[in-house]
């Protein structure tokens, strides 16, 4: 076996001191978000939802943005995260490819989400905000924000989709352990919640409803704002610490990746690993960068690049992005974090410029990949992460067929210890794939035909 | 805030190449295990239960035992584990003490248990064994062995106490994910299981029954052996990698601990962190070393040092150890890993020689400590680990009162993500303490009065 170390670690003083803002290097600027009147919105239009220091980051085109020292200090609770060489997986595949994975599962919440949650909690506190509201589906984002608010010292209220609230008690306890209030959505706390409960007392809830409730509570109080775990530019920015660390780690071993892979739901972990490498690609380095999504929710591969809303109720501005239509309800695949109808505008934009590729995979192939990973490398991946693993395995097999020693880097976005039911279903043969029927897609897109064109 | 790094990391090449065997340095040898005839057993007497290469380690008095290269390679999947400086916890306590914790929660199974599971699986495979059996209560050990057997390439069968099997589905899925067979105990697969099921079809099971089933299946087949996750000498040996790493990490920052703390159930994580430091203590360095146990199961603090069996059914040899009596059934505290009537003979022996101290803590104090830890350092500790944290906080407060800058090291034996129900119970005010009534203890000890004397 290869004598190279299994883990490439960085000392804390080598943790990046700035985030990388890809907006400084895009071939064309991203189209602006539009208000309901079809006109570009101004920063002030967002001021009741987000604090101004975050809005400034959202629209900034500065290439490097300094990470505040208190944020760096909190990130060192688990960062820099180790870069792993998956030697045992390589051996099992009999591939000449060298497979590296960036282990974001080492955070207290078990995923990459705290990278931005810490920063968002910090900026809100600095701006004088005392309460943050958010929504969560399976609970990964809600628990990351709960922890971050506790570390920073502000309050956190999480609206959790009722069906997950009932079915996933452990994520709920995690949030409570970190001091957050976790509420089943729809709830009687908001006007929108009360309205829906009156009409459908037994509704399982939805992410769209939970977002509406969280925003409603944020805008009605001076000391309260809303936090989003993906999609927006500032979230992508905060996640670039992943790729920036990976670049330093590759420098330590005098290698660089030929292929960079991340799974993509809203786009934040993919952006985090890939944007710093896209910088190199823009500046001439040959490299493939692949975003991998579920075939059940094929936003980048089959959704058009359009102006669409970020939520079902259209409370957000219209964003220029790949979308399956804001009314699209993805089937109940286990990778809850990848069940989103849209895609970060920045990720959509780099795809438009052919700086990245996208693939869509069936969940059974992903679980098979996840099992092989757990059997060789030990760590049990999150269902979202399994999509990156499955694509990595495809590429490693391709390298074997071509006899090429490619260097593959994937973002191992989180562990699966809170999501083991999906493994059970897969191993028991109870898991189905859900290729999206074209007619369903067209139906969903019909509802957004009148949106402004990009 | 202190400019020292939050994490002291070691490169893989600095991972220890030998385990430390404290048997080489004990002031007196440990009393031998006795058979049912009251006479010392020979290595051959154990040959149907354990492979001979492990039995040799069990009785070895060599100070340093080389870690086989394939074991080292597998350990690098997560080792060396980081040594953390808990600066935010120190600040919350306002203590001049410097608190360090060794994070064993970074392993794929989430605890220190794989340190020995990997080694045991490896030695069994080397000896030609194809199946390992074991028992598990809450599932921490069973999942560690499941993973290790899969990595090594042998089969694993885990008898899980029925009540845990039914109440903790996630640990069961973890084991299945790593390819192990997990069976509710008592089971119809063994004579002892069938007998108990016939008499009490609705029994919740017990660790004692599960051990009996696992041993029965191990001894009846040539290619099968049994693995134990704590108590025995070779298990303590394999865990010393924790303390050996910690010593190297302290050397890097030119410090050394004044106090070393670990929780103690069977004794393995405590031995792992402390034995390498006890070496220093034996050789003249002044230091306090504290084993912390639940007041509900106060083996070291209130159990006498006697010859007693390791299991309820007395299938094991008699071991010289602190014990509450092999028939003792601890109350249902959440720290399942600390619910054991006995204590590793080696740990018992160093207490007898006053090389360590022991304390017993109520579980509510431990959960309060765990919450403070999660609120300051982010990571949510296992209920077992919370005992080490609570003792650390006691010592840090003492340092504050004395105005002394003590250096405290604790073993953070695992994360609590699979054990969140206890947090929920504590936060909801549903958790009780169970100080052990003296008359219950005397009752339990009455049953072992006829055992040979040490």
Image: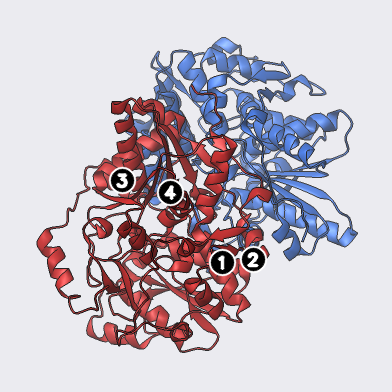
Chain colours: A red, B blue
Number of the front mark, 4 or 1: 4
Number of the front mark, 1 or 3: 1
Q: Which chain carries label 4?
A: A
Instruction: Provide the secondary structure element on which disc 2 rests.
Output: loop
Q: Which of B87 and A174 is in front in this view?
A: B87
Q: Quadrant of residue A152?
A: bottom right
Q: Which of A75 and B365 is in front in this view?
A: A75
Q: Do the residues labelled 1 and 3 touch (CB within 8 Å)?
A: no
- Residue A68's mark? 2
Report which residue position mark 4 lands on: A281
Tell me which numbered mark, 4 or 3, is placed earlier along the sequence.
4
Number of the front mark, 4 or 3: 4
Same chain for the residues under marks 2 and 4 in the image: yes
Tell me which numbered mark, 3 or 2, is placed earlier along the sequence.
2
- Residue A213's mark? none
Question: Tag 3: Cα neighbours inside 10 Å, few (<14), some, or many (≥20)?
Answer: some
Q: Are marks 2 and 1 in contact (CB under 8 Å)?
A: yes
What is the x, y in percent for residue A110? 49, 53
Q: Distance between the residues labelled 2 and 1?
A: 9 Å
Q: Do the residues labelled 4 and 1 touch (CB within 8 Å)?
A: no
Same chain for the residues under marks 4 and 3 in the image: yes
Report which residue position mark 3 lands on: A424
- The residue sitting at 63% across, 53% down in the picture is B386
Report which residue position mark 1 lands on: A119
- The residue sitting at 60% across, 42% down in the picture is B104
Tell me which numbered mark, 4 or 1, is placed earlier along the sequence.
1
Q: Mark 3 lies on which chain?
A: A
Instruction: Provide the secondary structure element on which disc 4 rests.
Output: helix
């Amino acid at each position: 076996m290869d004598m190279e170390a299994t883990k490439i670690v960085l000392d804390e003083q080598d943790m990046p001191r700035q985030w990388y803002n890809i907006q400084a290097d895009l071939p064309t600027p991203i189209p602006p978000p539009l208000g309901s009147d079809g006109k570009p919105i101004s920063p002030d239009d967002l001021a009741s939802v987000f604090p101004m220091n975050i809005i400034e980051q959202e629209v900034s085109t500065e290439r490097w943005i300094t990470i505040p020292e208190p944020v760096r200090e909190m990130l060192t609770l688990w960062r820099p995260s180790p870069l792993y060489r998956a030697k045992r997986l390589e051996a099992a595949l009999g591939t000449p490819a060298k497979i590296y994975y960036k282990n974001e599962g080492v955070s207290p919440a078990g995923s990459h989400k705290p990278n931005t949650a810490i920063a968002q909690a910090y900026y809100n506190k600095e701006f004088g905000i005392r309460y943050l509201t958010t929504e969560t589906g399976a609970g990964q984002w809600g628990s990351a924000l709960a922890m971050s608010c506790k570390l920073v010292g502000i309050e956190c209220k999480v609206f959790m989709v009722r069906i997950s609230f009932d079915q996933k008690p452990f994520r709920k306890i995690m949030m409570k352990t970190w001091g957050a209030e976790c509420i089943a959505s729809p709830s009687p706390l908001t006007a929108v919640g009360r309205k829906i409960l009156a009409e459908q007392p037994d509704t399982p809830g939805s992410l769209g409803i939970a977002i509406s409730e969280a925003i409603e509570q944020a805008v009605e109080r001076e000391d309260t704002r809303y936090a989003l775990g993906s999609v927006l530019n500032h979230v992508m920015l905060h996640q670039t610490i992943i790729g920036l660390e990976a670049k330093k780690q590759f420098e330590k071993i005098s290698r660089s990746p030929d292929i960079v892979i991340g799974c993509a739901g809203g786009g934040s972990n993919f952006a985090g690993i890939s944007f710093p490498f896209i910088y190199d690609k823009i500046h001439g380095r040959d490299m493939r960068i692949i975003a991998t999504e579920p075939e059940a929710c094929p936003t980048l591969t089959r959704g058009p690049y359009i102006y669409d809303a970020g939520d079902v109720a259209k409370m957000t501005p219209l964003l220029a992005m790949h979308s399956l239509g804001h009314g699209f309800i993805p089937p109940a695949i286990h990778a809850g974090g990848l069940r989103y109808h849209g895609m970060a505008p920045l990720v959509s934009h780099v795809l438009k410029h052919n700086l990245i590729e996208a693939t869509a995979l069936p969940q059974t192939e992903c679980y098979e990949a996840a099992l092989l990973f757990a059997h060789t490398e030990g760590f049990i991946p999150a269902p979202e992460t399994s999509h990156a693993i499955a694509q990595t395995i495809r590429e490693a097999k391709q390298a074997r067929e071509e006899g090429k020693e490619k260097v593959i880097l994937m973002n191992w976005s989180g562990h699966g210890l809170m999501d083991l039911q999906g493994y059970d279903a897969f191993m028991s043969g109870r898991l189905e794939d859900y290729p999206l029927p074209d007619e369903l897609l067209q139906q969903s897109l019909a509802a957004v035909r009148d949106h402004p064109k990009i």
